[in-house]
Structures are given as structure tokens and as C-alpha cells.
Image (cartoon, rainbow, N blue to C red):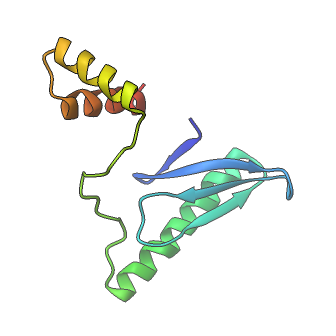
């Protein structure tokens, strides 16, 4: 995955061919904090600077830096897939919600 962890915060990294640089953007924040560099060492340095500035601004404004997620979201899937997922969950002795949660957790932490 294109995720870089800086000081406990995660950023998604992509290469921007138009400017021929790597671009990073922190995720899960109550605002935007991005950074650019030509190589990984400078990308990490720029990320730390960007994050520091963002956190200082949050402190000055009295804003929590991280978003708070409710843990709830709706997912729409085709009805036949819904049926298959429900069957697999039941076969594993799990609720549909628990099976989906476990499966997503495995996908994120592989």
C-alpha cells in the first residue's frame, strides 16, 4: 500500500507525473495537510514539517486534529453478493456485521 506513517499519523503517497514528484496527504485529519518531494527521505522530512504546522494550527484554533469516526457506514452491494455474504457469515457462525468487519480488518492489516 502507498501509506507512510509519520509520528503516528498516516499519509497516502502517490507519484504525480505532471510535476515529477511524490505527493503525500495525511488522512483522517480535520483539515488538509499535504507535502511534496522528489525522493523518500525528503518526503519524510516534508511530511514532518507539514504535520507539525497542521498540529500547531489546530492547537491555536482549539480544534482536534483527528476526525472522529462513528464506526457506521452503509455499503451497497448487488443482491446476489449480499446473499452469498450472508450465507458465508452464517456458515462461520458470525453475524453479517461481524463477518464484514472481520473481513475488512484482515484486508487492511495484511
Q: Nearer the viewer, residue 36 or 29?
A: 29
Quadrant in the rendering for residue 18 = bottom right
Q: Nearer the viewer, residue 89 or 40?
A: 89
Q: Is residue 4 above or below residue 106?
A: below
Residue at 13% x, 16% y is: 93
Residue at 43% x, 73% y is: 55
Q: Is residue 97 above or below residue 22?
A: above
Q: Is residue 108 left or right of residue 32?
A: left
**Percent from the top left, x then y, of residue 104?**
35, 32
Residue furthest toward the top? Answer: 91
Q: Quadrant of the C terminus?
A: top left
Residue furthest toward the front? Answer: 79
Q: Quadrant of the N terminus?
A: top right
Residue at 35% x, 26% y is: 106
Q: Is residue 15 left or right of residue 107?
A: right
**Percent from the top left, x then y, of residue 95?**
15, 28
Q: Is residue 99 left or right of residue 63?
A: left
**Percent from the top left, x then y, of residue 2?**
59, 40
**Percent from the top left, x then y, of residue 71?**
24, 51
Q: Is residue 95 left or right of residue 37?
A: left
Label total for image: 0
Q: Is residue 11 above or below residue 65?
A: above
Residue at 38% x, 87% y is: 60
Q: Nearer the viewer, residue 42 or 5?
A: 5
Amino acid at each position: 500500500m502507498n501509506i507512510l506513517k509519520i509520528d503516528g499519523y498516516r499519509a497516502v503517497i502517490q507519484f504525480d507525473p505532471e510535476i515529477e514528484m511524490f505527493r503525500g496527504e495525511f488522512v483522517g485529519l480535520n483539515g488538509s495537510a499535504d507535502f511534496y518531494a522528489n525522493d523518500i527521505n525528503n518526503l519524510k522530512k516534508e511530511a514532518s514539517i507539514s504535520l507539525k504546522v497542521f498540529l500547531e494550527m489546530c492547537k491555536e484554533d482549539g480544534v482536534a486534529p483527528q476526525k472522529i469516526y462513528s464506526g457506521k457506514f452503509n455499503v451497497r452491494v448487488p443482491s446476489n453478493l449480499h446473499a452469498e455474504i450472508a450465507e458465508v457469515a452464517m456458515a462461520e457462525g458470525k453475524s453479517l456485521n461481524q463477518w464484514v468487519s472481520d473481513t475488512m480488518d484482515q484486508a487492511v492489516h495484511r
